[in-house]
Image: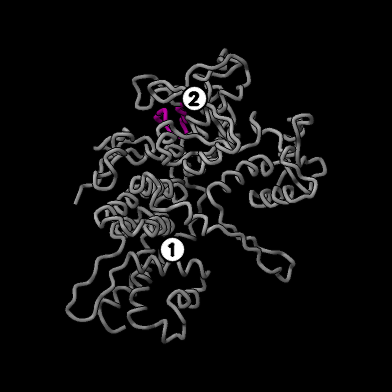
Amino acid sequence: MESGGETAIATGASALAAAVESLTALPLIPVPDTDIVALMQQIETCTRRLASVQRDLIVQACARSLPALNGSGSPALYLQSVLHISHGDAINRWRAAEDLAVWHRVGDEPDPAPVLPNAAQALDEGAISLDHVRVIRQVMNRLPGKVPAEARAYAEKQLAFQARALDPTHLPRIGEMILGFLDPDGKLTEDADRQNQRSAVLSPQRYDLMSTLTVELTPDARAAFDAVMAKLARPGMCNPADKESPWAEDEDNPVPRDVLEACAARDERSKAQRQHDALMAVLHPDFNPAKLGSHRGLPVSTIMTMSIEDVERAAGVATTATGGQVPVENALRLMARHCKTFVLVKNKNGMPLHIGEIRLANPAQRLALIATERGCTRPGCSAPASMAAAHHVTEFSKGGPTDIENLTLACDHCHALVKDGPRGWKTIKLGADSDFPGRTAWIAPAHVDPSRTPRVNHLHHPGELLTEVPPSVRPRRVCRASGLSPVRYRVLGRVVTPLPRQ
């Protein structure tokens, strides 16, 4: 190496390799429990910061035409070849370099700023990962071309800011909210566009006789698919390796609960495998939709929730019990064909009014919970309402009534966390003086959250995660209807200082 700058970089890389070598040789058993998480987070931050160095190296490789000299047809193929990484990983790294790096121009022209400047800064700080960047890029690519530059820049800033607190799996919810603010009526993307994209492609059989099915579902088809999968793809159902596993039922011959629980306990299939087997059950010649029976107390069907305001103007989106969304216009069309309408009356805080007094929640109460809570209420859980059961906030065995005010939704995993003792979670209903009156809050055990602060789940109510949008981004009527604060952000229950405007 000739220049001092290059020598310094090489020296730094050698020091990094030596530090990693030393770190991997150290024993982890002596590390106390309180330090394990801190160490994992510190190493994760360093790994993310290294991704920004890799990004700049990719820029230098392309500026020096190294992919062409190597005989590679593209930068991604070059990375795949020299780094021995997967094609998908190579594409992700190359696209991140395209959007996050400063690409130097020849001559006196100024270098352009990165396409995603705030995401680039967050990656440099180690606050987000390349997976976050991939999601941000996907959301930005979905913005309609007519969106003004100011709103587009604000959307990128908002996504990069929220990515610091959310994992890449939940970040798309923020993206959907931003798209909703930009297009509250959903008119920029018409139903005809979605219909043109629908497809189902079955690949040729491979050497092992397996085939790949690639499907693009319309919102209507997705809602119907989710409803069937929630029933037939749950653990214990349609298992070809278990002779006792049920594959269908009807009202006259329901599957005993103890039989299904026993089948579920020995079910070792992945979610993808269960959905395959559920599809196989649907394609079976003897299958009849009437044999779907019920799921968590309600007949297997597509349940859609929409406001009276959206119904009156035939715009907006309806929310399904599985967490999906359907344009209200499509939902109304389905209602006109075959639908039972359930009108839910809420109090001023948006919570359902009193309904019942038995141990098991009745169908009306479950519909009310689906409409208001939309999914499992434990903070951070993304399980939709179709995967959750009605849970007594104050246990029935301890005198808790089966009133709507004492019921909430909890998935099977989270429900099992509620128990007495130092490692058990608690559930409470928030009072009228809280930020979210009437909502269910969960209190983590002290080893998870020493402050024992009651927290609500915002993942099924993404509008609570995004509480500042400039007037230029959303129409005036959306500002009035949303009730969102114009001066604060709320990220997972914490009020944080908003980014300064530019």
* Quarter where residue 312 is shown: top left
Q: Amino acid at mark 2?
A: Leu
In the image, residue 436 above or below residue 278: above
Q: Residue furthest front?
A: 336
In the image, residue 358 above or below residue 489: above
Q: Amino acid at mark 1?
A: Val
Q: Measured from the top left, where is residue 100 in percent x and y?
A: 33, 64
Residue in view at x 34 percent, y 36 percent: 494
Magenta residue check for 20: no
Q: How is the image coloured?
A: one colour
Q: Say left or right for 90 vs 492.
A: right
The CA span between labels 1 and 2 is 59 Å
Please name the predominant secondary structure of the magenta segment in the image: loop
Q: Residue 344 bears which disc, if any?
A: 2
Residue in view at x 18 percent, y 76 percent: 109
| Dot 2 crowding, Cα within 10 Å, few <14, some 14–19, many 20+ | some
Q: Say left or right for 375 vs 309.
A: right
Q: What residue is shown with label 1?
A: 20
Q: Say left or right for 117 vs 412.
A: left
Q: Closer to the observer: label 1 or label 2?
A: 2
Q: Give the secondary structure at mark 1.
A: helix
**Which region of the structure is painted magenta?**
440-457
Residue in view at x 50 percent, y 25 percent: 343
Magenta residue check for 443: yes
Instruction: Decide if residue 423 is in sight here.
Output: no
Q: Measured from the top left, where is residue 163 in percent x and y?
A: 37, 50
